[in-house]
Image (spheres, grey):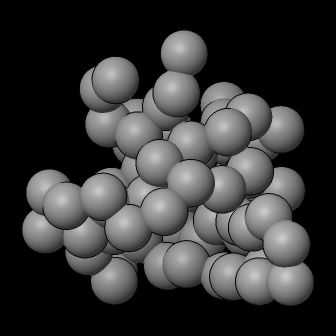
Amino acid sequence: MPEVNDWRMLVGRTVELRLDGRYVRTAEVEDATADDSIIWLRFDGNDGRKLISNTEGYEIWSIP
């Protein structure tokens, strides 16, 4: 599962969110800005959504 830097191509897909190379959680990509600076993730259950900026150090890994 390679890290993906073009977040727009992940809209609608399930991804792994990682920080410092460590798995954080799995989520669905709801949307991303055209410049790949912000991504909106939807989590299962009652965890809702989260906005992540590319300056926060997270890695987004595509799940095949």
Closest to the observer, 13 or 7: 13
Q: Would residue 50 be visible to someone looking at this image?
A: yes
Q: Position of residue 46 (x, y in %)?
A: 86, 84
Left or right: 5, with 64 as reference point:
left
Lateral position of residue 62 relative to residue 55, left or right? right
For residue 33, say whether it is visible. no
Tell me which residue sits at (77%, 83%) in the image.
47
Percent x, y of residue 62: 49, 31
Q: Say above or below: 1 vs 13.
A: above
Q: Which residue is most to the top?
A: 64
Number of marks: 0
Q: Residue furthest left?
A: 20
Q: Residue at x 47, y 48 (%)?
A: 16
Q: As rendered, which of 19 and 8 lies closer to the eye? A: 19
From the viewer's perspective, is residue 63 above or below residue 51?
above
Going by the image, does 4 lie left or right of 63? left
Q: Which quadrant holds residue 13?
A: top right
State the residue at coordinates (30%, 58%): 23
Q: Give the quarter of the figure containing the C terminus.
A: top right
Please identify the quadrant where the N terminus is shown: top left
**How far across and how far down the image is residue 22, in percent?**
19, 61
Q: What residue is shown at x 38% (from left), y 67% (from top)?
A: 24
53 or 62, which is in the foreground? 62
Relative image position of residue 51 (x, y in whole percent): 66, 82
Q: Would you place residue 53 above or below residue 63 in this image?
A: below
